[in-house]
Every structure is written in C-alpha cells, then in structure tokens.
Image: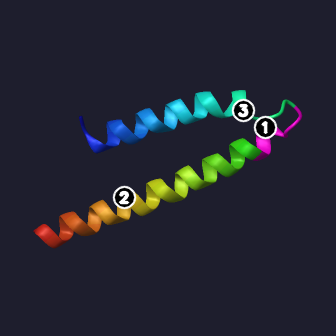
Amino acid sequence: MMVQDFWLAIATKSLCWIPLQLPWWLPWWKILAALGGSVLVTAIAFGILVWMEQRHNV
C-alpha cells in the first residue's frame, strides 16, 4: 500500500467521522474552511518536499 493511499484513507475516514462527533450547531463552513486551508498547506509543503527530493537525486 502506498503512503498517499494510507493518508487518503485516514483523511476520508476522519472526514466521515468528524460530523458524527460534533454538535449540530457548529458553523460548518468555518470548519470546512479550516480543514481546506490545512489540507492545502500540507499538500503544498508535501509537494515542495517531493520536488526538493527529486531535484537532489538528479
């Protein structure tokens, strides 16, 4: 199993699980914005790391 698949599985399980644990009155758009922002930052950081690693190996 690839690392990306592993993290994707964890992320999807977490996203499905989070709404069940949170109270119904929380503002969903704020939570989604925070999640989206952190996912975006993580993806960019991961992309930079992979790019640096590939450049280093050449």
Distance of label 3 from label 2 (alpha carbons)? 31 Å
Q: Nearer the viewer, mark 2 or mark 1?
A: 1
Q: Residue furthest left?
A: 58
Query: Helix or strand or loop: what does disc 2 sit on?
Result: helix
Residue type at mark 1 is: Trp
Query: Does residue 33 appear to the left or right of 17 in the view shown?
Result: right
Task: Name the residue nearer the viewer: 26 or 34.
Answer: 26
Number of residues whose C-alpha sits closer than 10 Å to that of mark 1, classed few (under 14), some (14–19) or many (20 or more): few
Residue, disc 1? 28
Q: Quadrant of the C terminus?
A: bottom left
Which residue is depicted at the point 54% across and 53% down?
40
Q: Would you say 41 lies left or right of 2 here?
A: right
Query: How many neighbours does mark 2 have within 10 angstroms: few (below 14), some (14-19), or many (20 or more)?
Result: few
Badge nearest the viewer, 3 or 2: 3
Q: Residue at the right extreme?
A: 25
Query: Which residue lies under the disc numbered 2?
Result: 47
Question: Residue 19: image x %, image y %?
Answer: 71, 30
Instruction: Relative to 20, say whether 45 is above or below.
Output: below
Q: Secondary structure at mark 1?
A: helix
Viewer-nearest residue: 50 or 19: 19
Q: Name the residue rendered at 70%, 42% in the picture.
A: 32
User: What residue does disc 3 label?
Assistant: 21
